[in-house]
Image (spheres, rainbow, N blue to C red):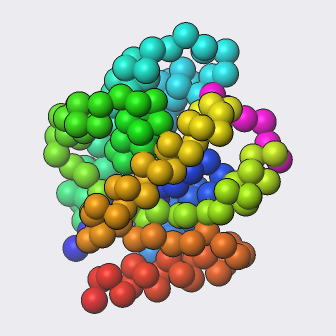
Amino acid sequence: MPAYIAFEGPEGCGKSTQAARLAEATGAVLTRETGGTDIGVRLRTILHDTTVDDLADRAEALIAAADRAQHIAEVVRPALQAGRSVISDRSVYSTLAYQGYGRGLDIDAVRRINEWATDGLWPDVVVYLDAPDEVIAERMRRRELDRFEAAGDQFHERVTAGYRTMAAADPERWVIVPAIGSIDTVADVIRRALDARAR
């Protein structure tokens, strides 16, 4: 049975690398939010542009939801209906973490908007890569930061706390993986955790 698996975590945790590794190993469709469609790429440009400094928090949340609606309709649902599993680098839970917990928008309102945007299709499994703060800080120092990455320590602390709150509240859906060690080591831990859950 095809599965919809989302990789989540703070900036620099390694989720994009691990999502790609798992998709390649399993033959799943690899995609991402934001920017998993041609329309989404254009929306992502607005969201991540560091010159955009006056975007209202609600507008940010709605742009993310618009990207998600297109992504679900164009990529995720058709793949699942065709019998293909989908692995997504970020999902609806990123909006709850970033715009809900991070920006301080009403969590229930953000959830309702995205329930409508996804037409009720949420990930079956969420792999949360929980990286130590010092590891993330070191990775962030190595690259040019986008608009979210440059949002400040307090914002990212709220995002991380939000992820951990969601994971604790829904352990049947969430798999928490410590993002420590080599890429291969983390990939092995992810595969073992998912295999154990599938039994």
- Residue 24 drawn above or below residue 17: below
> On the rendered image, what quadrant is the N terminus found in?
bottom left
Q: Which stretch did the figure color magenta?
A: 142-147
- Of the 4 image quadrants, the one containing the C terminus is bottom left
Please tell me whether residue 103 is drawn above or below residue 10 in the rendered image. Answer: above
Name the residue rendered at 45%, 30% in the picture: 103
Total numbered labels: 0
Tell me if I can see residue 156 in this picture. yes
Percent across and percent down for residue 127 are 43, 65
Between residues 108 and 70, which one lies in front from this camera angle? 108
Which image quarter: residue 114?
A: top left
Residue closest to the far right: 142
Residue 96 vs 170, above or below: the answer is above
Would you identify the image quadrant in which residue 87 lies?
bottom left
Query: Which sits in the foreground, 77 or 145?
Result: 145
| Quadrant of the rendered image containing residue 182 | bottom right
Asked if one can make out residue 33 in the rendered structure from this viewpoint, the answer is: no
- Residue furthest toward the top? 54
- Residue 130 spot, x, y in % from top left: 55, 64
* Secondary structure mostly seen in the magenta stretch: loop
Residue at the spot 51% in from the left edge and 50% down from the top edge: 160
Is residue 64 highlighted in magenta?
no
Name the residue rendered at 48%, 66% in the picture: 23
